[in-house]
Amino acid sequence: MAGFAGAYDSICGRAVNAAIIRIFGGGFQVTLAPDLLDKLSRIVGANKLLMDAEAHVQYGRDWTRVETPSPAAVALPGSIEQVQALVQLANAEGLAIVPSGGRTGLSGGAVAARGELVVALDNLNQIGAFNSIDRSVVCGAGVITEQLQQFAEDQGLHYPVDFASSGSSQIGGNVATNAGGIKVIRYGMTRDWVVGLKVVTGTGELLELNAGLIKNNAGYDLRHLMIGSEGTLGIIVEVTIRLCRAPTDLAVMVLGVPDMPSIMSTLAEFRQQMELTAFEFFSEPALQKVVAHQDLQRPFDEPCAYYALLEFEQTSGSEMDQAMALFEHCLEQGWVLDGVVSQSVAQARNLWRLREDISETIARWAPYKNDLSVVVSKVPEFLTAVEALVNAAYPDFEIIWYGHIGDGNVHLNILKPESLSIADFAEQCGEVSKGVFEIVREHRGSVSAEHGVGVLKKPYLPYSRSPLEIELMRAIKRSFDPNGVLNPGKIFDL
Amino acid sequence: MAGFAGAYDSICGRAVNAAIIRIFGGGFQVTLAPDLLDKLSRIVGANKLLMDAEAHVQYGRDWTRVETPSPAAVALPGSIEQVQALVQLANAEGLAIVPSGGRTGLSGGAVAARGELVVALDNLNQIGAFNSIDRSVVCGAGVITEQLQQFAEDQGLHYPVDFASSGSSQIGGNVATNAGGIKVIRYGMTRDWVVGLKVVTGTGELLELNAGLIKNNAGYDLRHLMIGSEGTLGIIVEVTIRLCRAPTDLAVMVLGVPDMPSIMSTLAEFRQQMELTAFEFFSEPALQKVVAHQDLQRPFDEPCAYYALLEFEQTSGSEMDQAMALFEHCLEQGWVLDGVVSQSVAQARNLWRLREDISETIARWAPYKNDLSVVVSKVPEFLTAVEALVNAAYPDFEIIWYGHIGDGNVHLNILKPESLSIADFAEQCGEVSKGVFEIVREHRGSVSAEHGVGVLKKPYLPYSRSPLEIELMRAIKRSFDPNGVLNPGKIFDL
């Protein structure tokens, strides 16, 4: 019965009834009153209310590992009605809820570190009605991305949003964070594939949004407001997803370029003539690390400052000739120094690995990671400015760049020098962040291109969004969740 | 100085300070106090404040011609700052504002019939910065759609949102209504091409949203909330538009089909294999009317219940063979009875006219028009249900169907029988509407697929949106426009 509200205030900016929560020492250690446990257990069933420490660690953290997980309880509802009942109870009892999907986020949006009730959607994992004419499928929030991709393939169709965490991320979480990935240049973000949503609001009411329609101009599009709101406006419980034609015979080209402006010219030239399904980039240091640590070969001997990886569909048989002609043109212009193109599915997969294995490869250097975007044309000057900043302040830091350059989305990675302790590195990176976000602001970019804001980027939101925008977000939050029970302290403080 | 607020209440549900507005008799006839006129004129300049009856008629109505235009004044601001000053004045003086674009709307969203100040964006018509790498262009809200389409073409690019009113509709209005049109199946709605917005809120503050970014997951996407909000949340003053690769060598096929399910099978078959840029439909009565009144020929002799018009790009030269093979397959299945394909640009244009000239052709019958959508697969049963309803109640009504069937968007048109007066026809159509919207609700469709809600569909919004959704829309409206000065009485009452 100790005063929790005060401490909580610093997180979410509003008092949550703390009668059931206790703090010990500096951290958050939480117990729930027996009658509340009983009420929770009556909603989801005793075996779906997890109270053991292991579950609390597992469900209290995401891929960031930054905050110490400390939920008060983990509930695994088995129906939409149970989710509603949990939210209604949270309102009545002043409990904070953290909606929880695959917890593969990189901004701490699904972290429960302050005695919250985790509502994990794992068991709403049914793939429901499929319609071949609408090319739509109804998914419970807990359906795994890969499960949906496989389902689409089984129907001769395609779910095109793809990223490293497809094997464990859930559709509900993808929608809540508007997940992006490696095919955005052609297929857009998760946002572009959601034609219907069921959402439990902060008052426990059920919103059914857009009902699978392609065209619907009847009032404000609350569906788009919900997408990317990171569980702060509602708990996404069901998603109707649009599928598309499966791509045929994808070919991959890796091109070496002398500098960033040349990548831009190459991108413009290819896009003018062809539909690309991907346009990624990575730097020479990134390539060196991957080749050294994975079972992969350099695409060609000549080292280049940067590499572009582009992918295209071969529907007619003429695309390869077209791509080769464009490659020749870029060579002549000096934009490209060398290149390879896949001749088989296996080769295409290996070329992709040069880009996709970077993240895993550099993990051993405990890198500082940042996910940023600017408009595509500003990427070269943005990279230059960030490199200058880091090199001036920390000349022994090694920067690894890669990302979705066709969308203006770059992943900045700084490797920890061996000589530096993790704590010192973290502190120095904190200093780097401020400077980097200042450059983001100058370039009118985004402090979070695809990873969301969560808790990690909350302090930096004002670098991308104006005080007026943040005030309007707060007002919207109050409309959907008047008591502030949903994911408090994420994105912004109330 | 008579009490205007009471009458106004019935429109927008909240009192607007009416000290400056007078009502005569049953209609709204409005004069502004000289000091207010003076303030308005100091903001935009005397020659940009239109007070003549002709301008008031012109700027007070849209294409619906349903309500009698009666604005208090028409202001033509020449800058964003002037728009802000007008909104600030409106707040101070209790004036209602109707934001005004090309006024080509079909739901009365831009009608000013109750003494409002029309803020017409005509003079914010500059096309600004273009970037060939980002393929983005900055447009003042008053840029005409066709002007943007031409600009894109001049850059070797394409603005793909296209519809009948392209010659007079404005970009700001397109965004405010999320305009759709004839290429949605391939290119989506206006929403899908907006990468940045400048918006003046109901308090006169300037919101800058998304700044041209492709990927931006930093907080709620207020841009999407603004798109389609019909001027009730803010006045769109500037739009950054993304352009795309220009399509090459478009071919058009018109297929005769025996029934609606066959159209669905044909659509599914073609989409599985090809990217279509359009999939439209019209009925035999629609075709007969067009052929009788335009300088056009039937595509083939055999009359069919319905016709599908589909369009595809020929990028590689093999698409025509592919389309012909699919056509043969559909013939064999009995889904298609006959068909033609364009062999030239002129032929393609003439085939398109069979579909595009319908609206103009049937205008002479003063038709009842309704713009509806359901999920694509439900179109056949939806059409059957509506026809049964109309035929049972009004057996002498002739129904003309056409629309964007690839998106589930059908335009229902009922021709006025010669024997019926306009007033009687309108009354009977009012009865039809209720039944039609009931069928829309049963099919979980939209009462407005692409025309917005405005005033005409306001009474029917609950057929598509739940009380909770409408309550949340009201709450959002209050956040952006606390004094209710922006387009009151449109979409919903406060």
Image: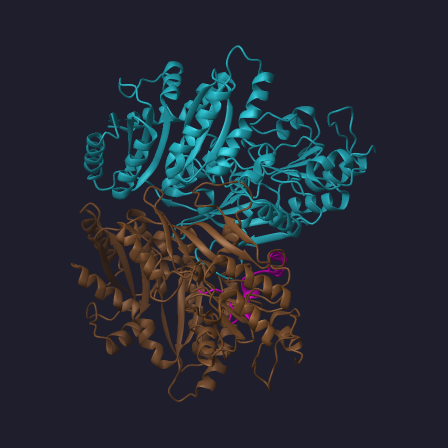
Chain colours: A cyan, B brown
* x and y percentages locating residue B475 in the rendered image: 63, 57
Establish if B110 lies above or below A291.
below
Tell me which residue sits at (51%, 61%) in the image.
B82
Left or right of A10? Residue A120 is: left
Q: So how many labels did they put on this image?
A: 0
Indicate left or right for A54 with B457 as reference.
Answer: right
* Residue B355, image x, y percentages: 29, 67
> In the drawing, does residue B58 fall left or right of residue A278?
right
Work out whether residue A202 or residue B8 is closer to the camera in this orientation and state it: B8
Q: Is residue B452 magenta?
A: yes
Please tell me in which quadrant of the rendered image residue B401 appears: bottom left
| Residue A10 spot, x, y in % from top left | 71, 35
Question: Quadrant where the C terminus of chain A lies?
Answer: top right
Q: Is residue A197 visible?
A: no
Quick one: quadrant of the N terminus of chain A? top right
Q: Which residues are magenta?
A: B451-476
Q: Can you see residue B58?
A: yes
Provide the major secondary structure of the magenta segment.
helix
